[in-house]
């Protein structure tokens, strides 16, 4: 439980100090070749240089008629130019004849421009529709009226317009989004070299916990932390391995933790607050170099961080998240997320923030940085932040309602409604997540 008694605790770390100490333990991981379809959100570990042109051939941007511009310079609604239709070309076909003077070739979007042609006139600027309306099969059209001069080269996409041969299209270090993935595929590749995803072992601790999926038992609660934490790992690009629930005793903790040593980091939840079941701390200290920290933040003050050693002497960083579900998730956002992103090779480790007008007061009773769960809305271009209601670190539905964390600095005792507040966006309402 949060308490006011530690106001001047000398060993309290600022969020920045905690984050820096954690980040110092992690480095970008090694690269690997992965299927392009699996690479979303990973950091590119090679320069992507094109050995083809995109588009490979000059092609049509519209369904229409490929013509010689000189033939149609005088065309207009009142002065149509009649051309002979000399065939048809669809996307995926190659031209079998040129467009010669006085002729046009019916052409579909994406089809290569036949030699001789330099302009495409879309159907809507021709007699195409009138001819169709009187029942003509478009394949039988042998004469077409051009009713607009358009301009030289219009609706022709030149070869190499997007990408030239030898062009560096993407640089080592970029994060692969759908656009980058598509561009790599457009060059004909289905594999890519990226920094590998970190593997994160997730362990719940507590005698009171039961696994979701099992029948409820009086006096016990379901382990929600592991689910929220594993989901957060996935959200930020890592691969979670769920180790299960350890009981608050030495044998159980030791055996569960031993299964996590193939990972790049072990995350536990609970058992790190003062006066807790000391057994959890004893286990961690006995097999590693673990510090128990108080971080100057609300929620998520208690935190453990250090390294654990396996029975075979393998070493692995460990972050002990607090047990309260909101604390676990907020601590994840502030302290685990940057470590995952650093391992993945990201350079930008901060969450995006916006300035918003507070619609409720935030009271800061004991000099910690408050991450208040807030609902951020945009009214006429201004962001507003209203609190989700009870800010108890056990009220997990506050995270359900929130789309941002409104930050009250540690040295500010109270922020009033109407004041400007910095907000970390948890997510943007862009359709990526629904609420
Ligand atoms: P502790 O730090 O072990 O005292 O836990 C703090 C609070 O978090 C207690 O109310 C626990 O029951 C709760 N808690 C601990 N682990 C979990 C978990 N995995 N899922 C949900 N609540 C938890
Ligand atoms: Mg406990």
Image (cartoon, grey):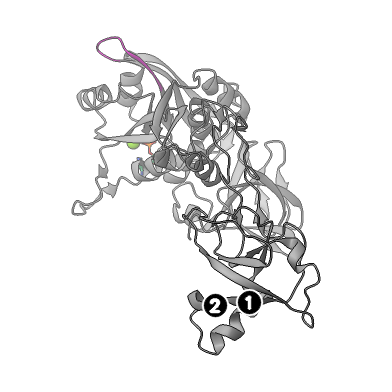
Visible in this render: residue 143?
Answer: yes
Question: Is 206 left, or right, of 173 in this rendering?
Answer: left
Which residue is farthest bottom?
Answer: 134
Task: Tell me the crowding category of disc 2: few under 14, some 14 to 19, or many 20 or more residues within 10 angstroms, Cα based.
Answer: some
Question: Is 370 left, or right, of 190 in this rendering?
Answer: right
Which residue is farthest top?
Answer: 313
Secondary structure mostly taken by the magenta-highlighted segment of the chain: loop
The residue at which mark 2 appears reads as: 141
Q: Compared to 33, does 65 lie above or below?
A: below
Residue 6: % across, % down:
56, 31
Task: Tell me the crowding category of disc 1: few under 14, some 14 to 19, or many 20 or more residues within 10 angstroms, Cα based.
Answer: many
Residue 271: say if magenta: no
Segment tinted magenta in the rendering = 310-317
Secondary structure, mark 1, is strand
Q: CA distance from mark 2 to mark 1?
A: 7 Å
Asked whether disc 2 touches disc 1, contact meaning CB atoms under 8 Å apart, the reply is yes
The residue at which mark 1 appears reads as: 144
Secondary structure, mark 2, is loop
Seen from the viewer's position, the closer of residues 17 and 38 is: 38
Quadrant for residue 234, please give it.
Answer: top left
């Amino acid at each position: 439980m949060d308490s006011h008694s530690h106001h001047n605790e000398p060993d309290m770390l600022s969020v920045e100090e905690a984050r820096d100490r954690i980040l110092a333990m992690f480095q970008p991981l090694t690269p690997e070749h992965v299927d392009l379809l699996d690479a979303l959100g990973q950091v590119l570990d090679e320069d992507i240089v094109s050995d083809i042109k995109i588009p490979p051939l000059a092609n049509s941007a519209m369904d229409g008629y490929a013509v010689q511009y000189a033939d149609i310079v005088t065309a207009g609604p009142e002065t149509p130019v009649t051309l002979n239709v000399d065939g048809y070309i669809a996307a995926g076909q190659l031209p079998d004849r040129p467009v010669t003077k006085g002729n046009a070739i019916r052409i579909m979007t994406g089809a290569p421009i036949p030699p001789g042609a330099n302009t495409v006139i879309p159907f809507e600027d021709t007699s195409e529709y009138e001819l169709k309306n009187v029942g003509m099969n478009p394949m039988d059209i042998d004469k077409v009226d051009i009713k607009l001069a358009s301009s030289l080269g219009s609706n022709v996409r030149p070869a190499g317009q997007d990408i030239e041969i030898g062009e560096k299209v993407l640089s080592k270090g970029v994060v692969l989004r759908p656009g980058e993935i598509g561009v790599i595929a457009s060059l004909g590749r289905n594999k890519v070299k990226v920094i590998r995803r970190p593997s994160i072992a997730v362990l719940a601790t507590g005698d009171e916990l039961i696994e979701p999926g099992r029948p409820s038992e009086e006096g016990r609660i379901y382990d929600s932390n592991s689910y929220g934490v594993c989901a957060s790992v996935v959200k930020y690009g890592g691969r979670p391995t769920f180790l299960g629930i350890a009981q608050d005793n030495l044998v159980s903790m030791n055996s569960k933790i031993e299964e996590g040593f193939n990972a790049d980091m072990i995350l536990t939840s609970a058992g790190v607050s003062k006066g807790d079941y000391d057994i959890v701390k004893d286990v961690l200290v006995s097999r590693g170099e673990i510090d128990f920290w108080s971080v100057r933040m609300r929620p998520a003050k208690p935190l453990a961080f250090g390294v654990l050693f396996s029975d075979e002497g393998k070493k692995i960083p460990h972050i002990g998240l607090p047990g309260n579900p909101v604390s676990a998730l907020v601590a994840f956002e502030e302290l685990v997320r940057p470590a995952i992103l650093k391992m993945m090779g990201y350079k930008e480790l901060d969450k995006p923030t916006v300035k918003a007008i507070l619609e409720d007061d935030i009271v800061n009773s004991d000099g910690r940085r408050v991450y208040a769960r807030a609902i951020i809305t945009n009214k006429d271009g201004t962001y507003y932040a209203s609190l989700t209601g009870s800010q108890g670190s056990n009220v997990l539905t506050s995270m359900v309602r929130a789309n941002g964390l409104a930050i009250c600095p540690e040295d500010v005792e109270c922020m009033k409604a109407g004041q400007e507040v910095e907000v970390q966006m948890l997510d943007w309402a862009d359709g990526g997540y629904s609420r």
